[in-house]
Image: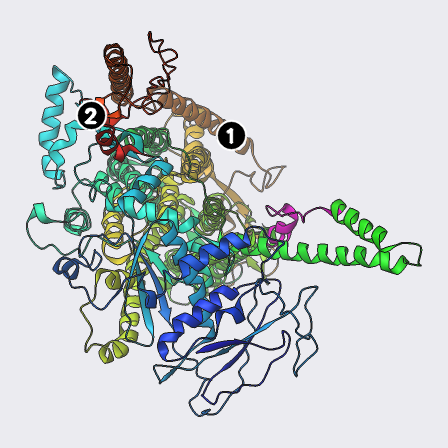
Amino acid sequence: MALRRSPSSTCAGSWTNGVSFRRVATAISESSSIHSDGLYHLTKDMSGMGLDPMSHSILEPAPYKQQPWAEELETLLQRNSMQITPSEDKIPVVESLSSPRGSAEGLYFSDGKRKVDYVLVFHHRRPASIRSRASATVSHDRLSIVSNGNFAPSVGSDPTAGRGSIPRVGAGCVGEVFMELGRAGGNELTEPADHEMHLVRQEFEANLLEAGLEIERDREVKAHGPSFTRLHAPWPVLCREAEFLKIKVPTKTSYELKEESGFGSTMNTVWRKMNQPFQPKVPHQDQERTKFLTHCFSREKLHLYNITSKDTFFDNATRGRIVYEILRRTVCVRTCQTIGISTLIAKGVYDASFPLHDGDYKVIGHLEEKSDRQVLHDEWAKYSAFYKYQPIDLVRKYFGEKIGLYFAWLGVYTQLLIPASIVGIIVFGYGVATVDTNIPSLEMCDERLNFTMCPLCDGACDFWKLSTACGTARASHLFDNPATVFFAIFMSLWAVLFLEQWKRRQNSLSLSWDLTGIEDDEEHPRPKYETILLQKRQRDQKNQKKKKKKKKNEPEKQEDGTVTGKDRWRQKLLSAMAAGPPSTIEKLTWKDRLPGYFINVSSILFMFGLTFSAVFGVIVYRITVSALIAMSPDPETKSNVRVTVTATAVLINLVVILILDEIYGTVALWLTELEIPKTESNFEERLILKAFLLKFMNAYAPIFYVAFFKGRFAGRPGDYVYVFQGHRMEECAPGGCLIELCIQLSIIMLGKQLIQNNIFEIGIPKLKKLVRALKDKGSAEKEMEGERPPQQWNLDYALAPFDGLTPEYMEMIIQFGFVSLFVASFPLAPLFALLNNVIEIRLDAKKFVTELRRPVAVRAKDIGVWYNILSGMGKFSVIINAFVISFTSDFIPRLVYQYTFSQTGTMHGFIDHTLSYFNVSNFKPGSAPLNLQQGNISVCRYKDYREPPWSPDAYMVTKQYWCVLAARLAFVILFQNLVMFLSLVVAWGIPDVPKAVVEQFKREKKLLVEVFLREEKEKFQLIQSLFSKDANLRPASHTLHPGQGLPIPGRYSTLPPLPTQGLAGEGVPRARCRAASFSQFTGQIPPTPRNENENSKHTAV
């Protein structure tokens, strides 16, 4: 490949050499993506292919006078770009791993000593199909590549000379650079887009070298496929970044955790022995009673830290986090004007970036030889370890605080589901035990009472006996009994207890994981935010240039001989000074986001309408299928109409929920992108709120309909509400809507958990992995010969990328809603949630350890916005359960009847009290039953509180209706205030921070103060000894020599010099002592300045 500058800055010249090449015209305009200097180094890189590069002077850009930083950046890129070319051997290009250690583990550089802290991956692309080998002659494929305007116009070039001239863009002069792209290796053709990406990677890796990282890559022999760039952070870089990030590290000072004495100590010992079989077998678990003091890392206090080895002082997760911080703030100014690795991945410069796992997860050797990944796999990620506690500290050490907090929260939630499940089982058992003594159920099943009910549909349906609904009534009592009220109150308090317990656990982990007092890390803008902001700046610059051009032309237009050249120059200068430098746009305003906000609101409303339409569609299905089954001549089919319709409708609801759930997740991501959030945390919060809102409505809309709307607007016989060609609105079963709510909740909850866990989380990832393996199988077999075994970076790259914790949290939050919101209708919900979570923990653990790339260890103080969502749902559950008990169940009507209208004070006669009378002669024409199998019937019954037909106020609501309604509303108010009061009592009685944590925090603070006071005391004693030695040596000699052990002036102290006698006027400089470094506290005063410098070298900043 060769590059040459066209003789004309605007036209394409003729090609003189006869080799096969591609012609690329690069137009240099205002928005640059490739720099001329980078093009020159590109020619140097291609010189190894047998092509001679052109002279650099031809491509040398003129200094860019309007940008003072351009010269400095050009010098930096010229220095660093030479380092990152493989031909210059600045980045080691390795044939194969020669070290046995590196070859076995794949975790080190080729020397087997330096760890691979991070990996960058990019692809060598296949040549495009349009570049066929048939064109052996010259083909003129032109590629216009936008540049940043750093090419200066050639002096003396004629803008109008030559053929095919390119028009001027704006006020800048446009130049062309022609690249002759020959065959790579004689067989493959080179893609110009790959060279553009190469230039960006060239500058980026040069800046990484400038930041102190060490880089190594393999020599790739294949023409396409992934290429891996391995990064290593040496000790000075780790120290610098650890101090910048304020990473807390252990000091040499340790203390024993305080143990309780007396009865408490005995109980703790017994509890530990009982829990021993449930504890995971983690190395160094016996050292939990000893804790080292931690302090923010500082290069001036290295002697304070417990540094046994520089290679292991920072663990792999911390090293990866440090390298990621460097990657995300490294800039590419000359080539693509971006910041950070995430932007480069979004632009396609790199395909992926990730830290390495700690070797293979398969166990080889004994426990002492296991890596952290192997320990996590054996003690955490296996289904056989379901009964054990989670090794949360090891999870945090390996994956970081954010993922550790998620699993800790999931563990607390699962543990507290145990008492809720036990109470739910007791409530359900109470219903089973009392079903045979429940008077309303017995009355409903008694055929002697002979309650003849009105038809369920018009025309085709006949009158029916209430005793046929005996099974529904008995099943309803299992969930609708007095114990349900107690369980609803218990679960409302349980939600508060769960949140309080999590706060205590979180505060304990904050102290244990040194999260107290950490500051939020500064976040860089997201790639899309940067792109849109850059586009806005470019538009603003163009508008300013147009305005300047108009102002520039105004004096020329007004020139009539009266304005001299000097005055015209002065006028231009004043106008330029008035204009000032172009204003830089720092951020996007609400006007830039207004279209996104409008689309967000309209789309969310549309999604709500879609959800309600799906629910309404299922309602129509129920109504039509019920009418069709009622017209069936088979009596067995007619008797099972309610069970058939309810079960099939719920299954349809489940399928619709699962489909819309996936759609809403994608839509929420798209809508969040339209809002253009600035940072990743802001993006994540907005995504969580949108996804939760849409998925909450999707999951609970059918349940809300059954609980609060079904049967409320059906009307009465003779005055029904009709929809769609005479179909009546559906009514609740004779036993009430609570049993249907229970069926709806149980099927949706269980189906959603089973299908999502087994299909979405297990089946689909395995299917993708199988497809990817089959896809790569053919190419892998061809390249198998001569290749070394796959290294750890190859194995990790084959894993799925980590996409965040939002799906994991969302699944658990929706489940928390099933457990807390409608738990009064389904007391077994906590039990099924517990069984699901026991599997979910191991499933997520296995996914993180074996199926996902290792995520960057991200610090986090808490679980973020998820806690606010949980708190809101806990308060909302109180209101929902109050309305479910009062309006959906028959608990309040039974109480009102027993204590107000019952003559015996018992529940006898309750069914007859709740049924009203209807005269069949009042049916509207065409709505009366056509086939009467019950004989001549003059009066039928229906469930409602209305006056009989012989009353003066026929079919009007009775006073019993108003009494029940008032009792229901009073119960809602009483229940809500009682539970809220008890919740406040529980929250007040349980401190957010455990007492032991408070005492431990105070003790650590006191010990740290003592450590620093002791250091200051030793420093003061050292300074005093220096002064005393100075005073003793000065009378003996009036001249000072550096070899006499006296401190050199100005070198050991910033204190003012002490007054001395006999030295005034001698010309001898006064001894100035600087505060000694901490490394000198424990040692003696070195005899010579040379030794002093050597001893304090490691503390230099």
Give coordinates of residue 45: x percent, y percent.
Answer: 39, 70
- Residue 277 found in image quarter: top left
Residue type at mark 2: give it. Pro
The residue closer to the viewer here, 1028 or 594, is 1028
Q: Please tell me which residue is depicted at 24% across the width and 63% down the height of the picture.
A: 795
Q: Please tell me which residue is depicted at 58% across the width and 65% down the height of the picture.
A: 151
Name the quarter where the C terminus is drawn: top left
Specify whether 90 is left or right of 561. left
Give coordinates of residue 159: x percent, y percent.
Answer: 69, 74
Q: Which residue is mark 2?
A: 1086
Mark 2 element type: loop
Name the quarter where the N terminus is drawn: bottom left
Give the magenta-colored segment's residue range.
579-599
Q: CA distance from mark 2 to mark 1?
A: 86 Å
Q: Which residue is mark 1?
A: 969
Q: Please tell me which residue is depicted at 24% across the width and 77% down the height of the picture.
A: 783
